[in-house]
Image (cartoon, helix red, strand yellow):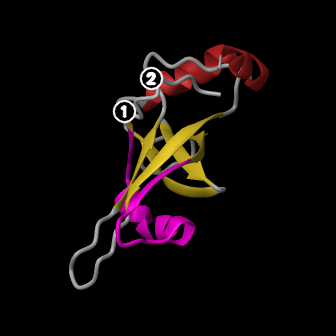
Amino acid sequence: MLAGDGKFACHVVGTSLHQATLEYLFSRTSTGLHRYCAALLTPQPNNPHDRKAVAVMIFDLEVGHLERDVAPDFLRALRKGGFADAACEALILGGWERGGHDWGDFNVRLNARTPFSIYPVGEWQQRA
């Protein structure tokens, strides 16, 4: 598990390419969302655009990536801890639809702080 500070300041990029997936997972509402869920951060060494890309997955579906300048730090933390990937809390925002042209994209933020600290689940639960 990835340690966070409760600020959800880690922005997920590329969500504009995954709006249909986010809408499938969360559905639009007239007021928009403010919903917490779990996310899995997993390296994508075969990503054709960036071999250091880190995908953000929710319910086994890709919803975006860590920012390009943040991903290498996350990958180092994974290697240091001997982990293949890490989970963290995610916050889904936006996604309102009020009719006509009044709608908003979904956004995803992660409860993660830098420098990244990753703990085995049992150890993370003891810290909480």
**Residue at the extreme front:** 31
Asked whether, in this view, residue 103 is left or right of residue 21, the answer is left
Report if residue 28 lies within the magenta region: yes
Residue denoted by label 2: 113
User: Dot 1 corresponds to which residue?
Assistant: 9
Viewer-closest of 19 and 106: 106
Q: Is residue 65 above or below residue 98?
A: above
Q: Which quarter of the image is occupied by the C terminus?
A: top right
> For residue 47: magenta?
no
Q: Position of residue 16 (x, y in %)?
A: 35, 61
Q: Nearer the viewer, residue 110 or 85?
A: 110
Residue 24 point in image, percent of width and height: 54, 72
As shown in the figure, which amino acid type bears the numbered disc 2? Arg
For residue 106, above or below residue 56: below
Residue 95 position in % (x across, y down): 37, 65
Query: What residue is at 37 percent from the left and 36 percent from the top?
Result: 68
What kind of element bears circle 1?
A: loop
Query: With 37 as the anchor, is 102 left or right in this view?
Result: left
Q: Are marks 2 and 1 in contact (CB under 8 Å)?
A: yes
Circle 1: is it few (<14), some (14-19), or many (20+) Cα within 10 Å? some
With 103 as the anchor, is 113 left or right in this view? right
Give how far across and how far down residue 84 sits, in percent.
69, 31
Direction from residue 6 to residue 102 in the image, left or right: left
**Looking at the rendering, in which quadrant would you find the N terminus?**
top right
Query: Residue 89 lies in what quarter of the image?
Result: top right
Question: Which residue is at 48% across, 64% downward?
Answer: 22
- Disc 2 on helix, strand or loop? loop
Which region is colored magenta? 11-36
Q: Tag 1 or tag 2, which sits nearer the N-term?
A: 1
| Classed neighbour count for the residue bearing mark 2: other residues with Cα under 10 Å, few (<14), some (14–19), many (≥20) | some
Q: What is the spatial separation of the Cα atoms under label 2 and label 1, in whole angstroms?
A: 8 Å
Residue at 48% x, 28% y is 112
